[in-house]
Image (cartoon, rainbow, N blue to C red):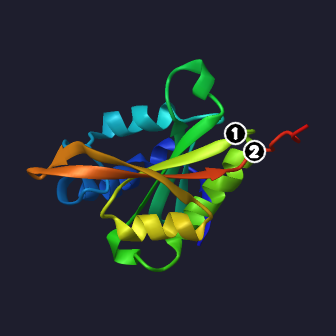
Amino acid sequence: MHVRVATPEDAEAIRRIYNVEVESSTATFDLVPRTLEEQLAWQQARSGAHVVLVAEEDGRILGFGALSPYKERPAYRMTVEDSVYVDRSVHRRGVGRLLLEELVATARRHGFHSVVARIEASQTASRGLHAAVGFELVGIEREVGRKFNRWLDVAIMQRMVGERPARA
């Protein structure tokens, strides 16, 4: 299994993995599955320092991860938000960890200072994955999303990846 930058040819596999979560879980707060055109646009918006990676084995996409802008205002430009999604048929095989570790390394190489994960609070596997890769819980947003007729909390996890200047 190896990780590489996603190409437009990967869009359908990424879309398939993502849409399963849209339709059946709270791993994403999207409510409507993505079309192929929307998936391609999403990937195109994450090029350069913001990136989409895929984990691939024997030509099959097992999962994907992305670094996206955290917020639009310029003062947030050194912080990115990560996302990781793994095909359900290969859960617990280390795909998510491999992707997240490479996202963290990519964020560091690209000069970002902080990586933030916004995880639906009951998603213990995702929270555990992030903790295993050095993220810390920094807060809970209460009832900020609504899906499947219930209010959802969001756990905010963060990992510092950039250099910190020495304190005087």
Q: Residue furthest left?
A: 149
Cβ atoms at labels 2 and 1 below 8 Å apart: yes
Q: Quadrant of residue 113?
A: top right
Q: Which residue is mark 1?
A: 112
In the rendered image of this protein, does residue 55 appear above or below residue 67?
below
- Callout 2: SS: loop
Q: Position of residue 148 (x, y in %)?
A: 11, 53
Q: Position of residue 15 (x, y in %)?
A: 34, 50
Q: Residues within 10 Å of mark 1 (few under 14, many from 20)?
A: some
In the rendered image of this protein, does residue 111 appear above or below residue 91?
above
Q: Is residue 69 visible?
A: yes
Q: Residues within 10 Å of mark 2 (few under 14, many from 20)?
A: some
Horizontal relation, residue 92 to residue 15: left or right: right
Q: Position of residue 98 (x, y in %)?
A: 59, 67
Residue found at x 40% / y 75%? 91
In the rendered image of this protein, does residue 78 appear above or below residue 28?
above
Which image quarter is the N terminus in?
bottom right
- The one nearer the camera, 165 or 145, is 165
Question: What is the spatial separation of the Cα atoms under label 2 and label 1, in whole angstroms?
Answer: 6 Å
Residue found at x 42% / y 65%? 126
The amino acid sitting under disc 1 is Phe
Residue found at x 44% / y 79%? 92
Which image quarter is the C terminus in?
top right
Horizontal relation, residue 50 to residue 105: left or right: left
Q: Which residue is mark 2?
A: 162
Residue found at x 87% / y 40%? 167
Q: Residue 17's mark?
A: none
Q: Position of residue 86 (x, y in %)?
A: 41, 65
Task: Say whether disc 2 or disc 1 marks the residue closer to the N-terminus.
Answer: 1
- The one nearer the camera, 152 or 46, is 152
The amino acid sitting under disc 2 is Gly
